[in-house]
Amino acid sequence: MLAPLESHVDLAALPQAERLARMRHSAAHVLAEAMLELMPEAELGIGPPIDTGFYYDFRLPRPLTQEDLTWLEERMRASIKRQHAFQMAAITRAEAEERWRKQPFKLDLLKDIEDGNITQCTHADFTDLCRGGHVNQTGEIPAFKLMSIAGAYWRGSEKNPMLQRVYGALFETQEELEAYEKQLEEARRRDHRRIGRDLKLFDLIDEVGPGHVVWLPAGATIRRELQRWIEDLEIERGYQHVITPAVAKRELYVKSGHWDHFRDAMYPVMEREGEEYVLRPMNCPSHIMVYMSAQHSYRELPIRIAELGNMHRWEKSGQLTGMSRVRIMTLNDAHIFCADTAQVEQEVEGVLHLMEEVYSVLGLKDYTYRLSLRDPNDHEKYVNNPPMWEAGEALLRRVMQKIGLNFYEAEGEAAFYGPKIDVQFQTAQGKDETLVTVQVDFHLPAQCKLEYVTEDGGRAQPIIVHRGVLSTMERMIALLIEEYEGNFPLWLAPTQAVVIPIADRHVPYAQEVAAQLKAVRLRVEVDNRGDRMNAKIRDAQLRKLPYMLVVGDREAAAQAAALRVRGGTDLGAMPVAEIVEKLRTERDTRALAP
Ligand SMILES: [Zn+2]
Ligand SMILES: [Zn+2]
């Protein structure tokens, strides 16, 4: 009998994080025990605790099924009921090699452990190679559930065999476990990748490339509406829109300093006729070229150059997520060239007001402002110019305090050339993401030797404010899909209404009704398929169309339609002219309804 290495642990006295880690790690042992019962030839990988529970990796003779998970879970509950003690013991290398002689992954792990440090853990009749950190006995494993099966390479390397990973969720109480399951369900329901596919908004096609979004007609419609809107808002505010090429000579980015700080995130260089070209990772150098294309006097400043600019960034394949992390994106970008810090303050204030207006129209509420500062000790990542940094950071802080925005500060999050304000959003998956930024930049103007003519005929250097408002079209629309769960407000909805004739003989009248809606540029369809009316209504609801206009004999006689709202409300028969007016107003005011 082996002498136990671990004495009794008082779980209640431990910090919660450690207590949970012990429970989750112990549950992984019990899972492996059950797996060997199900498939004695199973080869065991590792079984660590994770944030929400635990997992265990196995190489198995066949793929696991949902039924297997149910079976495994039952066996685990039986083992837990029997309150088996966890017993640690030190063993020699020879003993370990003998015990796991049929377990190649355990033997592989063994290579990394020094002689004298080899320990095992036994509960019931199951023994695992293990460093320790358990509960006392299986009965102390609380609420858990086996959640899913995924593929995972041994030691995370694609050169190694692919194993099957079983995930379990584990919390201290049943209530916490249920709350977690609910949160997962909510995230799944709101996931823009699923909704985007269901509503045919966009696609990611292997032949086109990972992270290269293909906008389908419906998604392109949403994007077009957003672009027209933001361009109009910007033009009203004195922005001048330009169009600059997405390919430029590498030299441009060497001059701007982007090549030095950013080349790993760029697509590889293209060479032709002795020149090197790159896909642009950022629009700043292009807009600096626009500024430099003419001489500017102090009277013209601030100059606000805007563009829906195409950018290319080599994100690692593993980082790509639907439309929220992509490689080719279009940023609602602008660079404001200011004469002095007083202008910078005014312009940043204007940008923040525009953001507040835009997010309020879109109905976005779950965001916070973050003042991103440099890490004062990191001179490699950040341009070394302390007075410049201090001036910029103080200025951004002052503006946010003046407007009364809630914000927090974070060191080490600035851009390489200057401090910034980040707008932080929560994704449906619970991740904190930066949607857009406002940056004050004294560095690039110096780097690119920008100047303007001062009042007394001298030369001075402008300061650049870099800003986005709508973010990239990709990230914003991913966010909106999740925010609305696909129920876009009327002005953004790809199809705004569908006219549903009750019988075939009502199709001509349905076409007439549709024509009246189209006359005011509403996006409308006629569902003239041979299906029953109820099937057509259900279909329109699945497509999340804002309005359904049902027409039959009575409606045709009265120049009316029975109006149904997405979500089920039936407004009854209304004159078509009235419906047109209602929808038009809703669209033009960008109401969040219906
Ligand atoms: Zn263990
Ligand atoms: Zn920029």
Image (cartoon, rainbow, N blue to C red):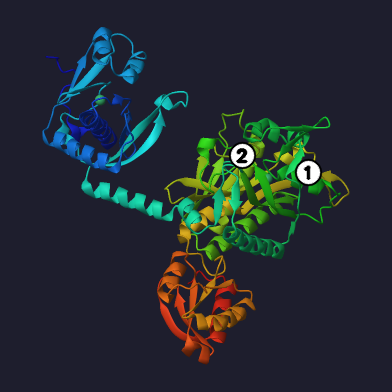
Q: Position of residue 123 (x, y in %)?
A: 17, 25
Mark 1: give few (<14), some (14-19) or many (20+) Cα within 10 Å. some
Q: Residue flagged by tag 2: what amino acid is it?
A: Ala
Q: Nearer the viewer, residue 15 or 118?
A: 118
User: Looking at the picture, does residue 227 appear above or below residue 244?
Assistant: below
> Mark 1 sits on what residue?
461
Disc 2 is placed on an element classified as loop
Q: Is residue 575 above or below residue 531?
A: below
- Ligand 2, by image quadrant, is top right
Image quadrant containing the N terminus: top left
The reply to whether residue 142 is visible in this rendering is yes
Indicate the position of residue 166 as horizontal and vertical percent values.
32, 36
At 61% from the left and 62% from the top, the residue drawn is 221
Which label sits in the foreground, 1 or 2? 2
User: Does residue 225 appear to the left or right of 245 in the view shown?
Assistant: left
Residue 174 - label: none
Does residue 264 appear to the left or right of 306 in the view shown? left
Q: Amino acid at mark 1?
A: Gln
Which element is circle 1 on? Answer: loop
Q: Which residue is mark 2?
A: 415
